[in-house]
Image: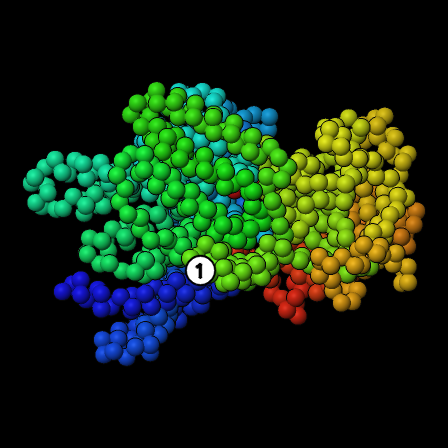
Amino acid sequence: MLTAAFHASGRGLVAGALGLVAGSALQLQQPALWALDRYVLLALAGLLVAALGHWGSTRRRGFVALAAIAMGIAALAFGATGLRATDRLADGLPAELEGRDIEATGVIASLPQRGIDGWRFRFEVESARLDDAAIALPARLALGWYAARGGGASALPELRAGQRWRITVRLKRPHGAQNPHGHDLELQLFEQGVRASGYVRAGSHRLLDEHAGHPLARARQAVREAIGRRLGASDAAGLLAALVVGDQGAIDREDWALYRATGVAHLMSISGLHVTMFAWLAGLATAWLWRRSSRAMLWCPAPRAARWGGLAAALAYAAFAGWGVPAQRTVLMLAVVTALASFGLRWPALAVWLAAMAAVTLADPWALLQPGFWLSFVAVGLLMISSAPAPRRVEGAWPRLRAAMQGGLRTQVVATLGLAPLTLLFFQQLSLVGFVANLAAIPLVTLAITPLAMLGVLLPPLWLAAAALADVLHALLQALAAPGWALWSVPAAAAWAAPAAVLAAALLIAPLPWRLKLLALPLGLPLFAPTPERPAPGAFDVIAVDVGQGTAVLVRTAGHALLYDAGPQYSRESDAGERVLVPLLRALGHARLDALLLSHRDTDHVGGAPALLKGVGIGRLSSSLAADHPLLAEAARRGIAAAPCVAGQRWRWDGVDFELLHPEAERLERAEAGRVKPNTLSCVLKVSRAASGDAGVSRAASVDAGVRRAAAVAGPRSLLLTGDLEREQELALVARDAAALRAELMLVPHHGSKTSSSPALLDAVGPRVAIVQAGYRNRFGHPAAEVAERYAERGIELVASPRCGAWTADARGTRCRRAEAPRYWQHPDFLAHHNGVEVAISAEAEPGGEQAAEE
């Protein structure tokens, strides 16, 4: 009877699953949360509508009843997700506690990640005090504990999961860079339940209990350390730690780059494939043992015991590996399939697929915004629609092996073709050697390296065998990634192009006539060969990239691109070039920069340059760097022409004039001879449209059919980029040629420091908008209050990147990234739209303090 009831309501459950996913996805688009009672009323109304729909379905009301179920569940899911989001936001850090020294007592709740400069870890707060008064903090913090300048992690206490500490912390609300096509750190922290980040202040800490909690995390750390002791400095140690205990941070960034270039990154962490493989092996072992007991066989059939045994093993493995989001998805999917099979329900594959998707969405609605969610479910869906008839049973070891190899090859073809559109949509790059790499890596990692690594927990010598195989795989991947064409990049396409391309992939792999398969070409073309938007001939656009405390400004003309400065180095392991600028350039369709201009040698301006030299082609490098600077040597090694930036240099691209105004040749010569403050050498660049009738646009630029152009010349007219210029040099520039400084847009000198933005410079430039690139709550207090007041007195709109994110000026006007698509989990400290496009940012110096932990 129970089975019949499930079968009778199968269509209703499918409708409910669709509604749950749709309602949750719709709530995630809210820019701000509603009042609590509105979510409650909506959820109750949805429940009522769904109940009426179910009642109608029992009376054969057909489509109307199913639509009511879907709409009711959608409303219920919208309301429930809103309630959960409200509860999570309520656990936030009050603004008045930012930047204060707070005494916090709590437990390390994650595997501490050791870096060159210190530790990063999650901290569960038990109590907190400020000025001897008890206060409430968010339950979970992301903290960094860094050594004093010049020291390293070895100078700090040894941190272990489960330790209880009393520490002094300085916190901030979650805040991350906001750039077009960039990673949303604030969403990531929100999904993880982390509502504040910060760092441990030096000089005040006390270990209260070595084993206060989190026994599973302590066991994971013990295994990670045992792997490290057994393998020493082997490159495979990080990979094995990632596969056994889910410590992805143990793999260094060069290896991650190799895995991405060869399309095997999905194998190098606790992925759905590993969890499924572990469940399958555990199920086989359970069935073998179960059949050895007649009493057990009478109590429960062996196939059912195998399914539940495999699920229990998968749950244990996922928990031991850190219960990451991919592992959670896989366990939930296995649980749905196991439950259906145990009830004897034979639902269509589509219904099972939707039920698993609904279960994952119910557990974590924000997973809908993660690439892994869609890559996982689209892969399974494509495998279902491309499935061939079940093969007849074959006898003999060789025929069975051949059939298994044919099935594996077919699965890899389907996955490669089917997931290519989503891979390009999310990452703007696709490994052209990924098919071959996965043919070797999937069996080697899933059937050899991972099992050996896991069995090594019981027999540590097996880690040596796993490491040897990992070294073989590493060498193979390096050989595959060596050709320059191994990784294919395309510009980011419109969001609608991805579903069309996925449909194209489905047409290619589905058992359909070739006439229908031909439709795949026009459907996939917008994604695989997009036409990125560029300025019209004679115009330029500007993107002041959000890189934190540093400078990086991209200037683009119809056929050229210049990057002014390369952003900061966040730590000895991370920089703006790799994390922000290379992905942005790739998404915008710039595999090559025509010029990289580095204003001066400070690390907040050149920190990302090494990654740029490695990650994109560069036509020429211009800078005020000394002749012996390592960046110039690296540029020469890569065959990049380099020259000093000298006042008076001019060139024209596509009807746009570029002119260097500072430094003069004599100043550069004096700098080579003696010690000169780097700021005084800052390259100052003026960008402006050429005079009317003298556009000088090349024929190649004007007839480029691969790029969409605006119909008329529009956008900014002039821009002044000033680096870290200081008052003395500002006054010298004004005295030399004040008229040349006149510009509509201006980069605020030295991030708004008190030593810059002299009244004489502001009066000479007379900008409409001035852009401050600075870090959120930076320790320098940029922009200074008196500097901000100076701009306000002259009616100059001051745009600060901590509140604006990336700032863009183009033919559509000026706009802030944070205002383009605001979401309720993002940092609230930005203002509303100006005329729907522009955003006015009130300048306010952030309180001082050390830079908080970089996530």
Residue 144 placement (x, y as % from top left):
50, 37
Visible residue check, residue 852 = no
On the rendered structure, is 192 left or right of 709? left
On the rendered structure, is 708 left or right of 274? right
Residue 596 placement (x, y as % from top left):
75, 42
Residue linked to disc 1: 512
Q: Residue at x 88, y 56 (%)?
A: 696
Camera-side residue of 356 and 171: 356
On the rendered structure, is 579 left or right of 286? right
In the image, residue 432 above or below residue 632: below
Q: How is the image coloured?
A: rainbow
Residue 275 placement (x, y as % from top left):
34, 41
Camera-side residue of 708 and 561: 708
**In what element is the residue under mark 1?**
loop
Say what amino acid the circle numbered 1 marks.
Leu
Q: How many marks?
A: 1
Location of the N terminus (image quadrant): bottom left
In the image, residue 67 above or below residue 218: below
Camera-side residue of 679 and 301: 301
Q: Residue at x 23, y 46 (%)?
A: 307
Q: Residue at x 77, y 43 (%)?
A: 595
Q: Residue at x 71, y 40 (%)?
A: 617
Say which quarter of the image contains residue 216. Answer: top left
Camera-side residue of 393 and 274: 393
Residue 25 placement (x, y as % from top left):
44, 62
Crowding near the residue tagged with mark 1, few <14, some 14–19, many ≥20 C-alpha atoms within 10 Å: few
Visible residue check, residue 486 = yes
